[in-house]
Image (cartoon, rainbow, N blue to C red):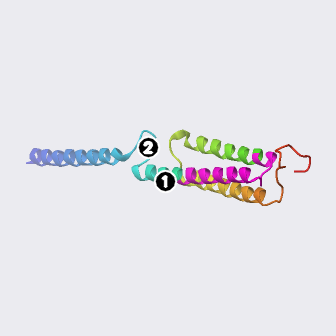
Amino acid sequence: MKSTLMKKSLAVLALASLGLMASSAQADWNRDSTGHGGRAIQQSNRYIQQINARQHQQMERIQAGWHAGSLSWPELHNLMHEQREIRAMEQHFRADGFIDVREFLRLDRALDAASQNIRAEEHDRQARSAYKAYARFD
């Protein structure tokens, strides 16, 4: 009697452990090599799309300001340098193939500051000279 009870208990225990192993293996199906889940990867991709769209928009604003003559050469140089720094920060954050919320917020703040700088430089009443010479008082 004891041996059949022991066999049944062992069988139930074995089936339960197999069920747990199968469910944990299934939970890992949506994970990539970095250990991030499917939802986290989707959110990271949305963050990347938002960041890239804002960077593209800011580059268009800088180019429009340059073509309109409202940005001087030093202003253009400084704004482009700021954009390169933001791009480098993004590449650093994406090195693991993933951007989390904290990294996204940091990039978002940097892009906000860059947007304010673009607006300030475009509206500071400094203009390029008509002949694109580097005037002393641009």
Looking at this view, name the residue that lies furthest to the front.
131
Which amino acid type is marked by label 2? Gly
Q: CA distance from mark 2 to mark 1?
A: 18 Å
Query: Which residue in the structure is indicated by mark 1?
Result: 46
107 left or right of 131 in image: left
Residue ID at (47%, 54%): 43
Magenta span: 50-76
Q: Nearer the viewer, residue 136 or 102?
A: 136
Residue ID at (79%, 49%): 75
Query: Which residue in the structure is indicated by mark 2?
Result: 35
Q: Nearer the viewer, residue 61 or 9?
A: 61
Q: Is residue 71 magenta?
A: yes
SS at mark 1?
helix
x, y (%) of residue 91? 59, 41
x, y (%) of residue 78? 77, 46
SS at mark 2?
loop
Comparing labels 2 and 1, the label whose residue is closer to the camera: 1
x, y (%) of residue 133? 85, 43
Q: Nearer the viewer, residue 26 or 88?
A: 88
107 left or right of 113 in image: left
